[in-house]
Image: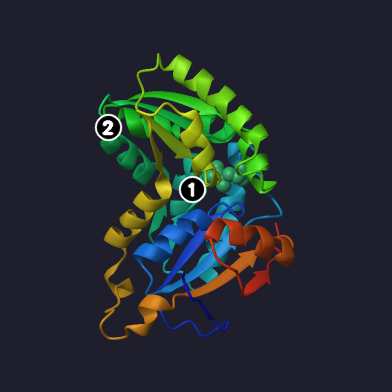
Amino acid sequence: MVHTNIVQPGKLRYPTIGVFDSGFGGLTVLKALLEQIPDIEYLYFGDTARLPYGSKSVETVARYAVEAARFLESRGAQMLVIACNTATALALDQIKSASKCPVIGVVEPGADAAASASHMKNVVVIGTEATVASHAYRKALESRGMKVTEKACPLLVPLVEEGWIEHSVTEQVARIYLDQAFQESARQSDVLLLGCTHYPLLKPVLRQVAAPHVAIIDSAESTARAVAASRPQEMLTNPLADPERRSAPRLKFFATDSIEKFRRLGARFLGHPIENIEHVDLKE
Ligand code: DGL
């Protein structure tokens, strides 16, 4: 269990990473970051009022994502992690051009993890409609020598948001999607890459549904590793100098919709209660 401290606005003293997602799902990436880099501050922005991104156009997603990135920078983020697969797949380049600090998305780290796990060099990727239509994962995996089958699974995000994590309906839906995806891949795939922030919560169901030889990979852990490896010098802290930081990362959350809902649903994704949430109204 991670204990958290409250960040007082305007008093950022620690190296700070901004994490952005369309809503709650990116908290699975924040959770992995907290495990690997516990000794800094995190600002998490969930664009809950404009979720889902997965069914929106490139132009809309890019505009929303750039606004969120600018907001996080204005609040002191020195590095940005785009935890949202859809925003990474559709708008990483625009976010990078609009940001002054380093930006890391989830697609490249996810592709790295899937490629190293696949002995058959054959990966099935599942994600939102927009992520699949962008073929960002296909490009990233093919450049690593993989064969790729992509499958949009639009019903899975609402099922997770409803809390139907281990529900029989969710299992049925997952079975239909995976049957189709693995049939298309001629059953040669030995890796299922979860290309959406919400899917890690469905790992128990997906494990039941996927064939036993299929490894299930999500990009949260590999993204956290990529962030740890590439954070700029000024963001490195000496844990020995302040051992308390290792067990007390500082967290501040921003949500564009109800704080109450963020608190309730967010805890499910992060795995512990969420405090210190501020409502943000981004003017367009
Ligand atoms: N965060 C999105 C993703 O990872 C899923 C939710 C949405 O569609 O906004 O693709």
Asked if ligand 1 lies within 8 A of label 1, the reply is: no
- Mark 2 is surrounded, within 10 Å at the Cα level, by few (under 14), some (14 to 19) or many (20 or more) other residues, namely some
In this rendering, the answer to whether 178 lies above or below 110 is: above
Q: Residue at x 40, y 13 (%)?
A: 186
Q: Are marks 2 and 1 in contact (CB under 8 Å)?
A: no
Residue 263 seen? yes
Front disc: 2 or 1: 2
- Residue marked by disc 1: 94
Residue 242 on image: x %, y %: 32, 85
Callout 2 secondary element: loop
Residue at point 34% right, 32% down? 141
Q: Amino acid at mark 2?
A: Arg
Location of residue 261 by image quarter = bottom right
Circle number at residue 144: 2
User: How is this picture coloured?
Assistant: rainbow
Q: Which mark is residue 48?
A: none
State the image coordinates of residue 121 (x, y, percent, origin top left).
28, 26
**Residue 15, position as x, y percentages in the image:** 39, 75
- Residue 264 in percent (x, y) is at 68, 62
* Dot 2 or dot 1, earlier in sequence: 1
Q: Quadrant of residue 40?
A: bottom left
- Crowding at dot 1, Cα within 10 Å, few <14 / some 14-19 / many 20+, comes out as some
**Which quarter of the image is occupied by the C terminus?**
bottom right
Mark 1 falls on what kind of element? helix
Q: Alpha-carbon distance for marks 2 and 1?
A: 24 Å
Badge 1 amino acid: Gln
- Nearer-the-camera pick, 183 or 236: 183
Q: How many marks?
A: 2
Q: Residue at x 49, y 48 (%)?
A: 94
Find ligand 1 in the image and state its quadrant.
top right
Q: Quadrant of residue 187?
A: top left
In this view of the protein, can residue 153 be seen by the observer? no
